[in-house]
């Protein structure tokens, strides 16, 4: 339920912390305050919020009615239109790395094993995970939440009580995916864990029979997506790979020396975003088209709803493109500087 939508950003809208910042809706003026705080005012000089915008970007989802973003220092923001964002109180200060919605409840995970839940995206409750390792990703499938992190896998049927699966490995695990039949945790191209129910896990040694991926190449996957027939994975070295079983991976494409951060499948094409304004699209996972943004900023994630795709990047900047357009062309949309306190 997580992979359908995500968000990206870039900082072409942002001049500096003490300059005028332009958003899609209006002009927002920023003036320095003591410490690291900044006072944001709209054209009527009404105070909007005090926040360090760099703290407000890690992951964004669309739940069918609203966008919800999570980030550093426990930051949570919600928006119905992607333009006006409301800062919510998560009750924690640890960084949040991912969030999922199962139709009834949000569950967000982060540093130091932090897990928080909410039924409305506004009021949040901290839950005990039983671990102190950072939790990087969370997915919902087969009536189970599954969270992964540094050397561990956690599962829960309700998002409240969590069970740790001992994988007997210190592998860094940055991703987890549900394909409708099984969960796949691809730690590297050489090591995977699979489960049909999210509770019982089986360790799998990946098959490296193809010369395109050498056995000694310890390829880490930053994200994995399922398109209905095959998996597609991206890596910090700019590589893009595909697999039908999650075990045997085939190299397809490389963006030289660029870390790729997020990949989605929208039903007809893949969209990938990366560290230097990189945006790539493909219908088959083999032939890729460059749609990169001119500003070479870090792009963290991409999300889409019924009308548009959005990209979330560094310093809270957002890019958007209309789904009705025949060609994808991301343009500056708004900024997470446009924050209000409800």
Image: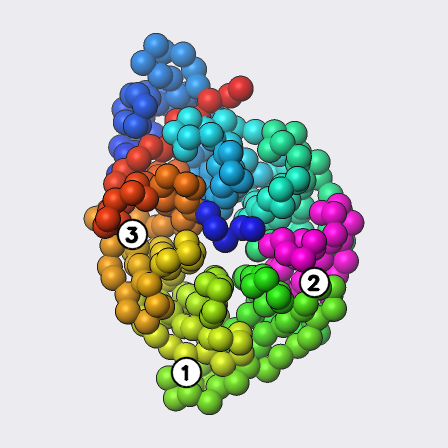
Q: Mark 1 sits on what residue?
A: 213
Residue 207 in magenta stretch: no
Number of numbered discs: 3
User: Which span is picked out in magenta?
Assistant: 139-165
Residue bearing mark 2: 198
User: Is residue 151 visible to us here?
Assistant: no
Q: Are marks 3 and 2 in contact (CB under 8 Å)?
A: no
Residues under labels 3 and 2: Cα distance?
Answer: 35 Å
Q: Quadrant of residue 312?
A: top left
* Residue at (67, 46) in percent of width and height: 115
Q: Position of residue 50 (x, y in %)?
A: 47, 24
Name the disc covering residue 26, or none: none
Instruction: Locate residue 268: give its quadrant.
Output: bottom left
Q: Main secondary structure of the magenta part?
A: strand
Up-down relation of residue 139 to residue 197 (above or below): above
Residue placed under numbered mark 3 in the picture = 277
Mark 3 against mark 2, which lies toward the viewer? 2
């Amino acid at each position: 339920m997580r992979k359908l939508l995500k968000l990206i950003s870039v900082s072409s809208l942002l001049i500096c912390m003490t300059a005028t910042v332009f958003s899609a809706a209006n002009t927002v003026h920023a003036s320095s305050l003591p410490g690291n705080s900044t006072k944001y005012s709209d054209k009527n000089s009404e105070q909007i919020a005090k926040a360090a915008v760099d703290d407000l970007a890690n992951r964004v989802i669309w739940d069918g009615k609203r966008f919800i973003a999570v980030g550093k220092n426990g930051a949570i923001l919600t928006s119905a239109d992607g333009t006006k964002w409301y800062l919510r109180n998560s009750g924690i200060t640890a960084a949040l790395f991912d969030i999922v919605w199962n139709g009834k409840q949000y569950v967000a995970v982060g540093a130091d094993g932090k897990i928080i839940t909410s039924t409305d995206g506004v009021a949040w409750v901290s839950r005990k995970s039983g671990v102190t390792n950072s939790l990087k990703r969370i997915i919902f499938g087969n009536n189970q939440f599954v969270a992964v992190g540094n050397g561990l896998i956690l599962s829960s049927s309700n998002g409240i009580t969590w069970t740790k699966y001992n994988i007997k490995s210190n592998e860094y695990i940055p991703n987890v995916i549900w394909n409708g039949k099984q969960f796949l945790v691809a730690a590297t191209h050489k090591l995977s864990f699979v489960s049909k129910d999210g509770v019982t896990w089986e360790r799998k040694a990946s098959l490296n029979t193809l010369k395109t991926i050498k056995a000694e190449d310890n390829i880490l996957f930053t994200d994995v997506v399922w398109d209905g027939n095959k998996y597609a994975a991206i890596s910090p070295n700019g590589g893009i790979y595909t697999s039908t079983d999650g075990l045997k991976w085939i190299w397809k494409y490389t963006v030289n020396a660029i870390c790729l951060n997020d990949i989605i499948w929208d039903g007809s094409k893949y969209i990938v975003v990366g560290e230097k304004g990189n945006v790539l699209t493909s219908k088959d996972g083999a032939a890729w088209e460059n749609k990169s943004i001119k500003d070479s900023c870090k792009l963290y994630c991409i999300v889409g709803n019924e009308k548009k795709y959005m990209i979330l990047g560094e310093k809270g900047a957002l890019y958007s493109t209309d789904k009705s357009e025949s060609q994808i062309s991301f343009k500056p949309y708004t900024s997470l500087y446009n924050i209000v306190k409800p």
